[in-house]
């Protein structure tokens, strides 16, 4: 027997004698939760499943998470704070967080927040301040009760306490259970919740045939802001709204769950042992759960909106009948449309004009040939008690030297830039410097406004005021394409790229932010032509002013990780 063969056989003989992994079992058993494979459930084969130590293949159910996934209680830091340690060495995508700090904050009778943070290093958290009161006084009776596992006395580094899970009681009923199979790594977080009742609503923005989730369909839906209108299939659309409403029973008692995270994410709603379940996955940040309890769905929604902030009260006329379209060819066509609508007896409170009114579709300009009479149109509509509203795209054409709004924007440094100079493409447009060049509707490349910085807000406001005076003072302003949207990202060229110019598009460098180990269902969707996270938007290695970090998440108009 050769030495290599001898050592191999000796290792095989000794394996059963070795101690079990810390906090785990010598042989992993499957759970009823599917393993999150990068290619989706349809890619599951024994070979693919075997690439992940946190997964196990079963002939009946396919690729499943093992019972060794999760965390154990190490000690109690305070009455409502636990330190957790990883249960075993199994992993999905590596770089697992070894220690988690779980903090439960009971803000008032109807709102509680549960946050899972890396105990050893700071991670990105959504930079939005929630309107939550200080922790409630213990003598205030709450509608809920959070049940945490019992924390043992402080344990040594090689000894683990009980597996971590939690439940939340609403009245006499368990409204929510967080299962033990919690995964938490640098670029992948997954948790599964069991919920009371079968009436689940919310989460998006995606395409749905009905408001109530179909548990039997067991569908997985992506959430990521990009320029995608509604269509068919499980697609990520314009907005990000990771809020779930669960009606617990016939009385209407309800629970709301806000997954406060802005990275690329997905969720799956399904049945698990007869209960409604939702699995939430995200590519970074922290696991931050805000729970809202009420005697009715309306009461829960009220708590939710008080927390995230109420919208500005709109003008009364903004609630009326409105008419908008893309493709008006002249002021005269808009006038004819208004006259035709009024003649038919259809109420009209707001008339929109899309980017067609611009000179070369450049913000803060007017095309003199077809829309030179725009200010008179605005005034005439006002006489009819119709309010004019104009569209703007926060993506400015790179007409350096002959486009004053761009010149003023560059002077105030208000545009999204590359994370570092090494990422600047070789074909960077002249004058674009370190800014990210994209494309929308203009005759050439564009720069995107970084609304995360105060200077950009001031500059944009100044430009709006200056232009509004020359356009007759329209009452409405519609900022469009602000997900942000970019056409043709990673493709040969955008669909509307000028035929007179050489083919070009914004192409994102291959890196761990643009190509995370688990890319979410957004990348697997058939509408994603490039097969990358940045499809129909900008790259993740682009920098906004907020904390000066790359954009790898999906919140509001300027995104960050």
Image: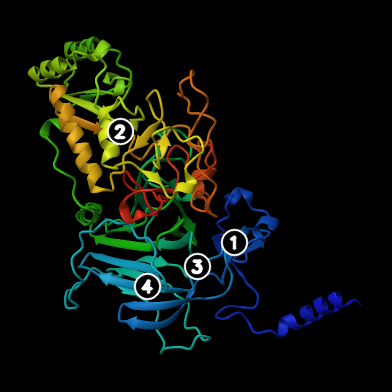
Residue 181, label in figure: 3
- The foreground one among 439 and 401 is 401
Q: Quadrant of residue 131?
A: bottom left
Q: How much space separates mark 3 and mark 1, taking CA atoms?
A: 11 Å
Q: Position of residue 520 (x, y in %)?
A: 50, 50
| Left-right relation of 319 to 505 | left
Q: Secondary structure at mark 3?
A: loop
Determine if residue 362 is in view: yes
Which residue lies under the disc numbered 1?
64
Assign the C terminus to one quadrant of the image. Answer: bottom left
Reply above or below: 328 against 205.
Answer: above
User: Mark 4 or 1 closer to N-term?
Assistant: 1
Which residue lies under the disc numbered 4?
102
In the orientation shown, which residue stands out farthest toward the right? 1
User: Mark 1 or 2 closer to N-term?
Assistant: 1
Q: Position of residue 26 (x, y in %)?
A: 64, 78
* Disc 4 + disc 1, Cβ < 8 Å: no
Tally the numbered discs.
4
Residue 530, label in figure: none
| Left-right relation of 470 to 48 | left
Which residue lies under the disc numbered 2?
480
Q: How much space separates mark 3 and mark 2, taking CA atoms?
A: 41 Å
User: Mark 2 or 4 closer to N-term?
Assistant: 4
Q: Secondary structure at mark 1?
A: strand
Q: Secondary structure at mark 4?
A: strand
* Disc 2 + disc 4, Cβ < 8 Å: no
Q: Residues within 10 Å of mark 4 (few under 14, many from 20)?
A: many
Q: Residues within 10 Å of mark 1 (few under 14, many from 20)?
A: many
């Amino acid at each position: 027997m050769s030495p290599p063969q001898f050592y191999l056989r000796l290792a095989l003989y000794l394996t059963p004698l070795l101690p079990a992994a810390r906090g785990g079992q010598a042989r992993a058993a499957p759970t009823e939760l599917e393993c999150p494979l990068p290619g989706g459930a349809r890619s599951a084969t024994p070979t693919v499943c075997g690439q992940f130590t946190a997964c196990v293949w079963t002939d009946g159910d396919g690729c499943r998470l093992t019972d060794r996934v999760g965390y154990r209680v190490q000690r109690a830091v305070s009455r409502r704070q636990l330190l957790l340690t990883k249960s075993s060495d199994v992993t999905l995508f590596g770089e697992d967080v070894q220690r988690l700090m779980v903090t439960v904050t009971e803000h008032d009778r109807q709102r509680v927040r549960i946050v899972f943070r890396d105990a050893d290093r700071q991670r990105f958290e959504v930079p939005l301040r929630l309107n939550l009161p200080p922790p409630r006084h213990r003598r205030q009776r709450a509608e809920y009760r959070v049940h945490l596992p019992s924390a043992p006395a402080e344990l040594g580094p090689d000894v683990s306490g009980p597996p971590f899970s939690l439940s939340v009681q609403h009245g006499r009923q368990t409204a929510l259970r967080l299962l033990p199979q919690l995964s938490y790594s640098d670029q992948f977080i997954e948790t599964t919740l069991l919920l009371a009742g079968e009436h689940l609503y919310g989460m998006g923005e995606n395409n749905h045939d009905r408001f109530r989730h179909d548990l039997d369909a067991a569908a997985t839906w992506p959430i990521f802001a990009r320029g995608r209108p509604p269509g068919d299939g499980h697609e990520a659309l314009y907005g990000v709204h990771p809020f779930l409403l669960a009606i617990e029973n016939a009385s209407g008692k309800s629970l709301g769950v806000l997954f406060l995270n802005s990275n690329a994410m997905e969720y799956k709603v399904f049945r698990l042992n007869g209960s409604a379940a939702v699995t939430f996955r995200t590519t970074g940040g922290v696991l931050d759960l805000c729970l809202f309890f009420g005697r009715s769905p309306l009461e829960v929604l009220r708590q939710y909106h008080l927390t995230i902030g109420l919208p500005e009260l709109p003008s009364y006329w903004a609630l009326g009948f409105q008419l908008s379209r893309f493709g008006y060819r002249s002021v005269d066509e808009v006038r004819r449309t208004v006259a035709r609508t009024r003649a038919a007896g259809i109420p009209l409170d707001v008339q929109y004009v899309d980017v067609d009114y611009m000179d070369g579709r450049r913000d803060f300009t007017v095309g003199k040939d077809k829309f030179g009479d725009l200010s008179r149109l605005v005034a005439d509509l006002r006489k009819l008690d119709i309010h004019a509203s104009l569209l703007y795209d926060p993506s400015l054409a790179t007409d350096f030297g002959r486009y004053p709004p761009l010149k003023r924007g560059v002077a105030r440094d208000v545009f999204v830039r590359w994370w570092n100079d090494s990422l600047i493409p070789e074909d960077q447009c002249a004058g674009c410097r370190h800014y990210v060049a994209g494309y929308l509707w203009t005759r050439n490349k564009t720069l995107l406004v970084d609304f995360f910085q105060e200077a950009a807000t001031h500059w944009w406001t100044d430009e709006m005021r200056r232009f509004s005076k020359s356009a007759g003072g329209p009452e409405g302003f519609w900022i469009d394409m602000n997900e942000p949207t970019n056409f043709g990202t990673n493709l040969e060229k955008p669909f509307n790229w000028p035929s007179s110019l050489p083919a070009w598009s914004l192409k994102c460098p291959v890196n761990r932010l643009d190509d995370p180990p688990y890319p979410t269902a957004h990348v697997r969707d058939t509408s994603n032509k490039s097969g990358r996270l940045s499809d129909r938007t900008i790259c993740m290695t682009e920098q906004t002013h907020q904390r000066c970090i790359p954009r790898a998440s999906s919140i509001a108009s300027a995104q960050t990780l």
